[in-house]
Structure formats: C-alpha cells, structure tokens
Image (spheres, grey):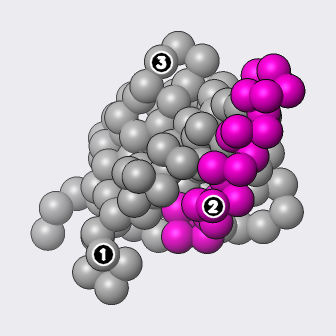
Amino acid sequence: MAAELHVELVAADRQVWAGEATLVVARTASGDIGVMPGHQPLLGVLESGPVTIRTTSESEGGTIVAAVHGGFVSFADNKLSLLAEVVELADEIDVQRAERALERAKSEADAAAERRADVRLRAVAAG
C-alpha cells in the first residue's frame, strides 16, 4: 500500500472532509505547495484557490477538489490540517450562480468578489 497522510479540511462552520490521501495541493502565501506523506512540518497561510486532494478511496473517485477562501495549513506527523474561512466542494458549487457573481463583480469592480467567483469556477473545472 502507498504511503498515506491523514487530511482534515475544515471550514469555520463545518468539517468538510476528512480521510486518507497521497497528495494535497494548495495555494499558500508563498505559492502553490504539494504535500505528500513524510513532508517536512509546515505552517502557512492559505490563499484563495482550489485545493486538490488525491484520496486513497475508490468510492470518492480518487480526487476531491474544493474552493478555499483564506485560512491556514498545518502539517506534522503525517497529519495535514487545512483550516479555512470558507470551503466549497467542487460538486457543491452552483456554476451558473458563480458565473453570475463573476460578471456582477467585474461590472462593480469588486476585486475580492471577482476572486472568490473565479476560485469557485476553477475548482469546478479542476473537479
């Protein structure tokens, strides 16, 4: 069996996903980072962006993708915690609503809202 790490993806209001994975890719303030079993301990600030989790579960299709909006990432002892302000799994995102939000944000020159809508759409595309 391949080496695994335990992952917990948590939003401010709920635990979104927890399980075993072989790779997690997330965007931090220092850039994109990939975490695999045995990675050096880390603590970082999550930037808004898609998070990709390669799971060890066949029933989950092998990959979980989520739109993450701010938070922290911590890894030690093969346990990865992604603690975010807002997390939306790709299969929970309403694409039409996200597209409308993106257009509205562009017309109102709201850079933060534009970024959130763009992250949602990129998560859906990656999922």
| Camera-side residue of 104 and 78 | 104
Q: CA distance from mark 1 to mark 2?
A: 24 Å
Q: Mark 2 or mark 3, which is nearer to you?
A: 2
Residue under circle 2? 96
Q: Which residue is mark 1?
A: 61
The image quadrant that residue 40 belongs to is: top left
Q: Is residue 71 magenta?
A: no
- Secondary structure at badge 1 equals loop
Quadrant including the N terminus? bottom left
Tell which circle, 1 or 2, labels the residue nearer the N-terminal end: 1
Lower sequence index among marks 2 and 3: 3
Magenta-highlighted residues: 88-111
Q: Which residue is mark 3?
A: 31
The answer to whether 104 appears left or right of 61 in the picture is right
- Main SS of the magenta part reads helix
- Which residue in the rendered view is the most extreme toward the top? 30
C-alpha span from label 1 to label 3: 27 Å
Under mark 1, the amino acid is Gly
Between the C-alphas of marks 2 and 3, the distance is 29 Å
